[in-house]
């Protein structure tokens, strides 16, 4: 039956005359506030009188919520789809639903504080299907919003948003609250954020800001993820928008956050949760950089003091790091003939362990000579299973057979880099470690061939391009800019300051005014 339209009273059939009078009387007895207007369609009126519908008798409309919804990523850019998906996640059924358009939503939401019913935005098929699934016989709409065909056979309750205290029909979801946490990304504008936050809060849930959609970015986000996921990451968490990935990625990220050791500075994602300031060199070898100019304890104190020089220069935490030259390019072939002198694992362990206890990140730097990077990296697998240890590949010192150091600049192929990243990512996943930094040193384009083919897809790694040329500020900036041309997506930038070779060396303020601001800065 088509609903009766206001203004068609004189043409009513006689069969409905007594019904209209009863509705008029019931409305008068109900004494609804002026801020609510009921537009009752003929078909709905018959149902109300025959079945005693709560909306017409003054009783509560029933809302049934899910106890703990399945963990889901909701669409962030499509407001109607997001509101429908949120409703489907939170509500098993509901006698009533709020329906708004985007223009009225901002003014409507403050009036819905504590209102337990689903809120749907837009008039499209997704919303229509959700209203049908809910079994909603009553629609609450802001005055002036036309529900169109969605109003057919339903009672329409209009609320006047210009009223000081707009009233809503009585609706009850019982005393139980829904165990749910909504993750929203404050860095991603979503038209559904306000709606989702209002509905989840009204359901008794919690709303948590998760910058970048990364639950591992900081200690705060990790703690929130642990609390939200509890013992089962597959239930109880809703996230809004593409920055959280798909649902399976979100469940995996929540699981990692609950079980993974955090990095120095907090969180389990290397970047963009922190920036690092590193002392570069090799223990007891002053000529290779400042790391070797003093003993272990003094080195840790020195790098912490270096970090204080960056206070106030970045929004992110700035943490200390050591970049230890672990295999040192040699002018002699050595016993294994690879022109690289490898430090022993046991000798390095003291440095790695002490750094970890002091909250200092460690990067093991490889200068492989004529051997390949993967072969050398595997020598230090035991150290790389520590959560605060990453890896650096220094292509300047990667030789082909017959070549010698300092006679030419070394180079590495993207394929060889990918062999290392695949192995390192697998090691990280196998041991349940936080994201590892993988640094690629470069100051000349020829140092990495087929650079466009470097694989940056592994979430276990933060691949970082280290611009480590020295010289005048103009020369260093030219190198910095050149290295970023045609750089594969997903690579972070790093910078090196040389105490002796730079003329002059950049100050911390100058270093952090680079575009983009470097995530890793080492001092040699």
Image (cartoon, rainbow, N blue to C red):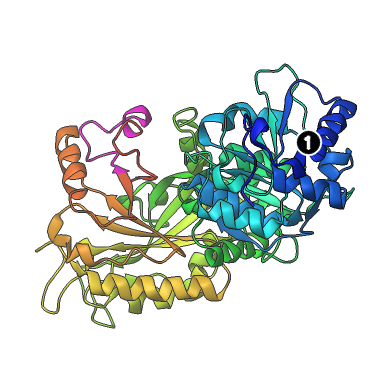
Q: Residue at x 57, y 51 (%)?
A: 127
- Please indicate whether residue 82 sits to the left or right of residue 313 in the image: right
Q: Magenta-highlighted stretch: main secondary structure?
A: loop
Q: Nearer the viewer, residue 287 or 94?
A: 94
Compared with residue 48, is residue 354 higher up or lower down, i.e. above or below?
A: below
Q: Is residue 222 left or right of residue 116?
A: left
Q: Which residue matches tag 1?
A: 20
Q: From which residue to which does the magenta span run?
A: 496-511
| 132 to 202, vertically: above or below | below
* Relative image position of residue 471 (x, y in whole percent): 17, 39
| Mark 1 secondary-structure assignment | helix
Label 1, residues with CA under 10 Å away: few <14, some 14-19, many ≥20: some
Q: Is residue 94 magenta?
A: no
The residue lying at 62 percent from left, 36 percent from top is 5
Task: Give x and y (percent) for residue 11.
Answer: 64, 35
- The residue lying toward the viewer, choosing from 512 and 37, is 37
Q: Name the image quarter holding residue 91.
A: bottom right
Q: Which of the 4 image quadrants contains residue 68?
A: bottom right
Can residue 229 be seen here? The reply is: yes
In the rendered view, tell whether residue 127 sits above or below residue 186: below
* Number of marks: 1
Residue 299 in percent (x, y) is at 49, 47
């Amino acid at each position: 039956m088509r609903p009766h339209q206001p203004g068609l009273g004189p043409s009513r059939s006689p069969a409905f005359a007594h019904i209209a009078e009863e509705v008029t009387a019931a409305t008068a007895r109900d004494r609804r506030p002026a801020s609510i207007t009921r537009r009752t369609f003929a078909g709905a009126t018959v149902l109300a009188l025959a079945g005693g519908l709560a909306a017409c008798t003054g009783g509560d409309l029933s809302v049934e919520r899910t106890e703990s919804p399945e963990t889901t990523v909701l669409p962030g850019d499509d407001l109607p789809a997001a509101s429908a998906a949120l409703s489907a996640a939170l509500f098993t059924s509901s006698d009533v639903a709020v329906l708004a358009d985007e223009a009225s939503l901002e003014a409507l939401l403050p009036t819905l504080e504590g209102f337990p019913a689903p809120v749907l935005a837009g008039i499209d098929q997704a919303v229509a299907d959700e209203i049908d699934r809910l079994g909603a016989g009553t629609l609450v709409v802001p005055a002036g919003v036309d529900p169109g065909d969605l109003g057919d056979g339903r009672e329409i309750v209009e609320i006047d948003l210009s009223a000081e205290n707009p009233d809503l029909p009585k609706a009850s979801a019982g005393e139980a609250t829904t165990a749910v946490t909504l993750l929203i990304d404050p860095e991603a504008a979503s038209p559904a954020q306000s709606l989702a936050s209002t509905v989840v809060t009204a359901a008794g849930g919690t709303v948590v800001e998760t910058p970048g959609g990364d639950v591992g970015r900081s200690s705060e986000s990790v703690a929130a993820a642990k609390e939200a996921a509890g013992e089962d990451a597959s239930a109880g968490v809703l996230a809004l928008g593409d920055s959280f990935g798909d649902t399976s990625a979100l469940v995996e990220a929540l699981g990692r956050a609950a079980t993974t050791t955090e990095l120095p500075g907090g969180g389990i994602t290397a970047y963009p949760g922190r920036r690092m300031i590193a002392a570069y060199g090799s223990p007891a070898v002053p000529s290779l950089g400042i790391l070797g100019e003093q003993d272990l304890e003094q080195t840790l104190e020195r790098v912490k003091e270096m970090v204080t020089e960056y206070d106030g220069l970045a929004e992110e935490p700035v943490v200390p790091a050591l970049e230890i030259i672990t295999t040192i390019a040699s002018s002699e072939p050595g016993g294994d003939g690879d022109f690289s002198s490898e430090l022993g694992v046991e000798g390095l362990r003291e440095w790695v362990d002490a750094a970890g206890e002091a909250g200092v990140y460690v990067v093991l730097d490889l200068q492989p000579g004529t051997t390949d990077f993967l072969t050398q990296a595997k020598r230090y697998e035991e150290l790389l299973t520590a959560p605060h240890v990453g890896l650096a590949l220094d292509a300047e010192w990667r030789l082909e057979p017959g070549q010698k150091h300092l006679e030419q600049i070394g180079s590495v192929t993207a394929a060889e880099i990918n062999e290392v990243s695949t192995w390192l990512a697998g090691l990280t996943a196998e041991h349940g470690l936080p994201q590892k930094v993988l640094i690629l040193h470069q100051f000349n384009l020829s140092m990495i061939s087929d650079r466009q083919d470097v694989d940056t897809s592994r979430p276990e790694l933060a691949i970082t391009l280290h611009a480590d040329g020295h010289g005048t500020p103009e020369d260093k900036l030219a190198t910095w800019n050149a290295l970023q041309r045609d750089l594969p997506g997903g690579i972070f930038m790093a910078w090196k300051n040389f105490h002796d070779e730079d003329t002059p060396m950049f100050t911390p303020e100058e270093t952090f005014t680079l575009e983009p601001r470097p995530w890793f800065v080492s001092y040699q």
